[in-house]
Structures are given as structure tokens and as C-alpha cells.
Image (cartoon, rainbow, N blue to C red):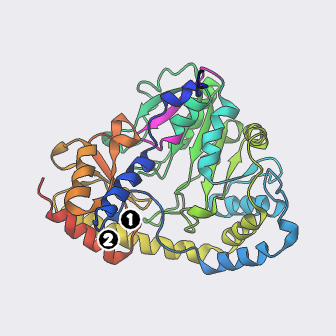
Amino acid sequence: MKEPPLNPRLADLPPYLFVALDRKREAAVRRGRDIINLGIGDPDLPTPGFIVDAMAEAVRDPSLHRYPDNRGSEAFREAVAWFMRERYGVRLDPATEVLALIGSKEGIGHLPLALAGRGCAVYAPDPGYPPYWTGALLAGARPVRYPLLEGNGFLPDFGSRPLAGARGARLLFLNYPNNPTGATASPGLFSRAVAWALERGAWLAHDAAYAEAFFDGARPPSVLAAPGAMRCAVEFHSLSKTFNMTGWRVGWACGSSRAIRALAEVKSNIDSGVFTAVQAAAVAALRRGDAAAQAMRERLGGRRARCAAALERAGWRVFPGAATFYLWCATPGGIPSARCAERLLERAGVMATPGAGFGPRGEGYVRFALTAVESRLSLAMERIAAVRW
């Protein structure tokens, strides 16, 4: 008797970073430790009340209990088009250039299935969000990491390897504001990226999940505002970080109608779309969420400034990014990032994310997620400062 085999592609996947981290945290908690979790970027603040109220009203409507429109409701797609025009000056056709997602991670993971075939090169940033390359692996594509170096402000260098050649490229992922580094796009970056893609006949995907989490007063741009972008680019947005809606699982893809149509075809064969009542709540967030988003920025910006100052006083080197609710820091004495995270957990009771989990170029860094109430963040900084390395 033989047991049936599994898909061999699963063997190519690394353990998902945040699952492994949470297991370590749970083991420490079982031992009775008080652990301050700054590892996973899951906002601690509640979803704004007006969004919850919109959901409560919508969920009582029995007409919304049926299968949703797989592309997203007309009201949701129109709200997205309005939001993109108001925030970024990008004009979209809600019928053909907007697609509802069960969170942006889902769309990012499915995109290589839609746009890259077996063996096609998918370029992903290093360090970067793991689903960029794991989605490529599951699709049978060939992930190629390109470096984001501190000396270049954690921005891609299109004139250096491997991006300078890349003649077989099919898809390039970008992410600004950047997770894990907090870097923001420099002027002209998206225009260079679009030119790079069009020259090679490649697709360009921009993960803009943190576009509303900026603290310098300058709203990050959309890649779709760059000349030529609508011919080759798709951009992902999420309500998770902007409105503290991680558990709600709602976001969208927008951009090239060809890319949106291809992604919608993949999704129609895999999932049944976003619960329409959740989309109704998302419409309220997009249409009426200015004040809530600004309040979020002010509170998270205060956390970021205080924690960065505390870490620097303790001798840490903090990368001065201007967005996201993360702090990207060099490890003390250059010790390996996994060892640094383990020591923080063991000696300070603070959980951080080792940079190597975001790719080889993340080695020598750790990421702190500022997703705990201020009193717990202050305690975490005190504990970290007391660690002797």
C-alpha cells in the first residue's frame, strides 16, 4: 500500500515566516512569559465605528446573503474608482479596471497564475513580502530576487544586475511604501519601472497596501499615474492597514484591463468573491474614511517617532523611513537576524521579525511592528534597552 504524494512544489516553499514566529510566541506564553508581540503587522486599534455600523446594517439585508459578483459589487468598484481619482489623480473604468479581492495578499498570490506561465521569470524585491516569490513558485514560475540595498535607500536599481538584463522577465513586483523597510518611492521611480517593463514586454505589479500609512505629509504616489502604466501595470490596495480591517479580508486590484481580466478569470475558478456585506462596509470606509485615516496616521506617527528615538538611545541603528508602521533596524553588532530575534524573545520578552525571513538581503536587520498600545510599546522599548548583547 502506497500513500499518495503531495505536490512537489510545496517542498520548494519555505515555512511561512509569520506562522513560525507565532509558534515561538505561543510556546513562550505557555511557559508563563509576558510577551509583547511586535512581530506581525496586525493593527491593534479597532475598526472605526462607522464602518462596523455599515457592516451591521448590510449583513441584515438578506439580498446580500447570496453569492457575490466575483468582480466586486458595482458600488464597491465605483467607490474604488472615486477613491483612486480623489487620492492619486488616477482615472479608472470601474467596469474593467477594478477587481475586488479577498484582501490584497490573495490577489498578489494569484497574480503569477494569471500573468506568468511555467518557467517565466518573476522578479521580486529582496528583502520583500514573502508571497511575491511563493506565489510565483506555486504557479510554476521562476522567482528571481533583486536587491534593495540600504545604500540605495532600499529602492531598486534598474541599471544593475539582475534588473539591467532581465530579458526574459514576465512580471516585476514593487512595494512602496515598503514592507519591511518603511522606504518610500523616490521621484521618478515608477516612471523608470514602467519604462523597464514596457521595454521588455513585462508586467509590473505594485503592492500599495501601506499607501495611507505615511507620516511626512506627502502622500505616496500611485504607479498608475506614471506615463504608460495602464498598458502594463496593476496596483494592489488594501483596507487592512488603513482602517484596521485585517480580519475583514477586503482589498482591490486596479490597472490594466487585460491584467484585471486575467486575474478575474483565475479568481472565478478558485473563489467566489468578497461577501457583499463586507464590500458595503468597505464602500463606507472609502467614501467617508478621511478623518479615520488621518487619526490613524497621527497616532501611528507618534508611536513611530517615540520608538525610533528610544531604540536610537539604546544604541540601535534605525532606518529613517517615512511610512508604514514598521521600524527596520540593523541588528546590534551585526549578529544574525534570527539570533537577534531569539535573544529579544528570550531576554526581553519582545517578539520581532528577523530580516532574513524577508529574503537573504534582509540578513543583519530586524523589523518591529508598532502594533501594540502605547503603554506596551514603552515597556517593550525599556526591555530592549536593558538587553546586553
Residue indicated by mark 1 = 370
Q: Residue at x 36, y 71 (%)?
A: 303
Image x and y of residue 122, in percent: 56, 29
Label annotation for residue 234: none
Quarter the N terminus occupies: top right
Q: Is residue 275 magenta?
A: no
Q: Residue at x 71, y 72 (%)?
A: 284
For numbered disc 2, what is the local secondary structure? helix
Q: Residue at x 84, y 74 (%)?
A: 61
Between 177 and 218, the one lying in front of the other is 177
Question: On the image, which quarter does residue 250 sit in?
Answer: bottom right
Q: Going from the N terminus, do you reach mark 2 or mark 1 first?
A: 1
Between 45 and 212, the one lying in front of the other is 45
10 Å crowding of disc 2: few (<14), some (14-19), many (20+): many
CB-based contact (under 8 Å), mark 2 and mark 1: yes
In whole angstroms, how far apart are the C-alphas of marks 2 and 1? 7 Å
Residue indicated by mark 2 = 377
Question: On the image, which quarter does residue 269 sit in?
Answer: top right
- In the rendered structure, which segment of residues is drawn in magenta? 118-131
Residue type at mark 1: give it: Leu
Image x and y of residue 182, in percent: 40, 54
Q: Residue at x 22, y 62 (%)?
A: 348
Q: Is residue 126 magenta?
A: yes
Decide: is 228 above or below 296: above
Image x and y of residue 52, in percent: 66, 76
Q: Is residue 192 visible?
A: no
Image x and y of residue 39, in percent: 38, 57
